[in-house]
Amino acid sequence: MTRKLTPRKLTRRHVLAASAVVTAGSFVTPVRGAPPEAQKITPTLIEAAKKEGKLAWYTSVDLPVAEKIAKAFEAAYPGIAVKVERSGAERIFQRIGQEYQSKIYNCDVVNSSDAAHLIVWKRAGMLAPFVPEDVAQHFPAAHKDPDGMYASWRITLSPIAYNTRLVKPEDAPKGFIDLLDPKWVGKIVKAHPGYSGTIMTATQQLSRDLGWEYFEKLAKQKVMQVQSAADPPKKLALGERAVMADGTEYVVTLLQARGEPIAEVYAVEGTPLVTGPSAIMARAANPNAARLFTAWSMSAPAQQMNIDVGALRSAHPLVKDREDRRKLADIKTLREDAAAVADQADAIKTRYTQLFKV
């Protein structure tokens, strides 16, 4: 007998268990021995997508960036409307789990800043295989699922940053351990791994490399706790806190471009690197529009727009990074381990909540 799940408390194990019930029939997408053939954008696909006329895109990228990307696709393919459903990665994960439990299939394309979500959805048979031509030809193996279920639509970092009006460069923290200095008590803002996929991934990396002792000490610094990884840079820009312990790099870059007094710090210990994969849901109501959107979003022009407009980073080797920030190859980064996040996420959220009491 299957235990009834509380809607707001779905764990990754719950998603797997619940989806096994929902997908006991033909819904399950088996793990393939080899990825499907690469797909080009063809007139046939475009015509089929226009007949559907719409798609729903669930994403955790900051809303202004998501809306610009959606409008660019709509301009490229008139007659296909993109409904942007933006929320924190963990809330997207919860929402999709709840919808699938209720046999509601609203999501066509999903993007999460927590790559572990894609692993869980793949294990649960909730994704449809699809390999865009650009992914097959250009993306490194580390940025595409070997079974063709998902690929890295974006890359970001979770750096330290500070308000340049409140902190002098010579006084700014150089790494994560520096944040434990008593001079930063009451001056730090950080996001929550129970809401943000970026912060969940970063927390896993930091707890692995620095130990939970780091978070135990940081929790005593009277930290302002916010939800999304996009929030800490905005709090810095408003002057509400002097330093951020984590957050998303692309929002820092966009705020800098607007003239806000923010400077990033790539920690001496290494900066968490976070991939944000995208996939098509197996029960997509608009599968052709989903395929077209996915193929377009992974193309070099669309990936370049991610960089130029959204300040995201890309796994596509044919794009050019921004001139107003350090190149990724020149930054010491921490190793991402999405499989470990998939297995440890629930324990991470529990321990974090106990330490920070939020």
Image (cartoon, rainbow, N blue to C red):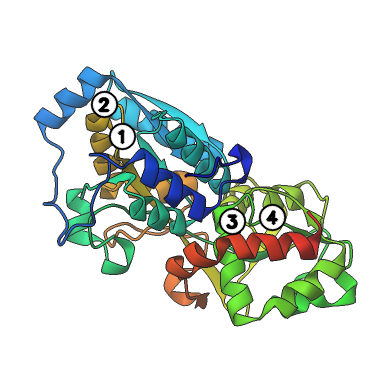
Alpha carbons under labels 2 and 4: distance apart: 36 Å
Name the residue type under label 1: Arg
On the rendered image, what quadrant is the C terminus found in? bottom right
Instruction: Decide if residue 336 is on the left or right side of residue 272.
Output: left
Given the image, on which type of amino acid does mark 3 rest? Thr
Q: Amino acid at mark 2?
A: Tyr
Q: Which residue is label 3 attached to? A: 248
Ranked by sequence position, the earlier of labels 2 and 1 is 2
Of mark 2 and mark 4, the one earlier in the sequence is: 2
Q: CA distance from mark 1 to mark 4?
A: 32 Å
User: Residue under circle 1?
Assistant: 283
Q: Alpha-carbon distance for marks 3 and 1?
A: 31 Å
Eye-nearest disc, 2 or 1? 1
- Residue that label 4 marks: 191
Would you identify the image quadrant in which residue 264 lies? bottom right
Select label 3 or label 4 by which is in front: 4
Return the residue at label 2: 77
Q: Which mark, residue 164?
A: none
Task: Give the mark nearer the N terminus: 3 vs 4.
Answer: 4
Secondary structure of residue under mark 4: loop
Locate residue 43: give its quadrant: top left
